[in-house]
Image: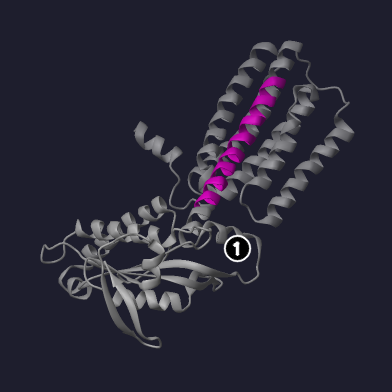
Amino acid sequence: MIEIIKNLIFTPSSRYPENWKPAYLAMQLGFIAGGFGLLGRDLIIITTVENWNIIILSELFFAVFIGLGFLLHTLGFAQLGIILSCIAGIGSASSFNFLIGWSTFFHLWYINLAILIIAVPIKLKIKLGLALAFIGVYCLMFIFFSDIKPLYEISSITENILGLSNIFGSLLVLGMPMGMYSLYLEQERNKSEQLLHNIMPKAIADRLKTTNETISIDNPEISVLFADIVNFTVMSEKLSAEKIVGFLDEMFSKFDDLTEKYGIEKIKTIGDAYMVVAGLTSEEKEHAAILFEFGKELIKIASSYSDHKGEPITLRVGINSGPAVSGVIGKSKFSFDIWGDTINTAARLESYGSPGRIHMSNKTFKLINKQLRHEKRNIEIKGKGLIESILI
């Protein structure tokens, strides 16, 4: 039974609005803390004020509406519950100001509840109307009733205790939801930043956030790598969709980890092909050598997986170096991409490559500038004719 009540109070119902959920727990705790505060306040008044009946009856009258607001909020009617509770809170504060005076700081609730109603995701017209109404009541009460003698005299000790309880109580009720919202917004901002950085280089993402203009970059010297799974079409016909997607996700995730290790940029995946670029947003002179080492690790990682026959997965890897143009295209589903003859040649080098080996242009091989055992080849590329390439 206790577990059922706990879940009911602290777990948002299916009806509860999605955009309210970040502050759900804080709201509920605020209601509960307010309930305990009400009991403690009533106990103090009963034990220290001689004619307490009217004060307590007034408190209980408004407490019924706040309790109803708590119930509505718990059942998922968040907007109605909060509005009802805030209006009842303003009524309760006004009643206390009349009955025991302004020195108990009940007038703090006018401002705090106005701020709270603005902070929660209610329709703008409604929240502004209510907030202005709360501040309007506060102004009228202050102008016309703040100097009027209260109906009931209370001791200075009771006055101080009630004053402190209102100061800390208002901070608690206001601070928790707003703190939770701030934390939620920070988390969502970080998540959005991470998602943006996952689809384009950080430097480009930062520019995209600050301008609506077309983002295009001339890259005078970069290296690009394409990696493709050998016999993937046959393998995909033999395995279930779940296994294929799971395998690609696991292996490409390891590739992604490598891009961070080497400080290079993943551009995209195209089916079973994986494309990365080095030297894109930095003046990295060793971009060709970096991609060569990266390619060797890709082949090693792929070989740790098995195909439908139980044999190690092999990759064809192609690398080319040269100038390219990159930029962001699209609006609602924008993407970062890179174009040019350098890119097309790298793709061709991959497709004409050999399983488990790295096929690169002669220019890339010279940039690596290492004594490596290699095989010279001549391949025909559409639009370029016969070119010399290196197979390692």
Q: Residue at x 55, y 48 (%)?
A: 78
Q: Is residue 31 visible?
A: yes
Compared to 162, does 325 lie above or below?
A: below
Compared to 146, does 230 lie above or below?
A: below
Q: Residue at x 40, y 71 (%)?
A: 363
Question: Which residue reaches farthest front?
Answer: 371
Q: Main secondary structure of the magenta part?
A: helix
Q: Is residue 180 magenta?
A: yes
Q: Amino acid at mark 1?
A: Leu
Quarter of the image with the C terminus is bottom left
- 208 lies left or right of 114: left
Q: Which residues are magenta?
A: 163-191
Give whichever of 287, 160 is nearer the camera: 287
Query: At which x and y percent is residue 171?
Result: 65, 30
Hey, which quadrant is residue 367 in on the image? bottom left
Give whichever of 362, 2 is nearer the camera: 362
Give whichever of 238, 216 is nearer the camera: 216
Mark 1 lies on a secondary structure that is helix
Quarter of the image with the N terminus is top left
- Tell me how the rendering is colored: one colour
Query: At which x and y percent is residue 169?
Result: 64, 27
Q: Is residue 265 visible?
A: no
Q: Residues within 10 Å of mark 1 (few under 14, many from 20)?
A: some
Q: Which residue is mark 1?
A: 208
Q: Residue at x 80, y 37 (%)?
A: 138
- 25 lies left or right of 391: right
Query: At which x and y percent is residue 185?
Result: 57, 47
Q: Is residue 231 magenta?
A: no
- 141 lies left or right of 377: right
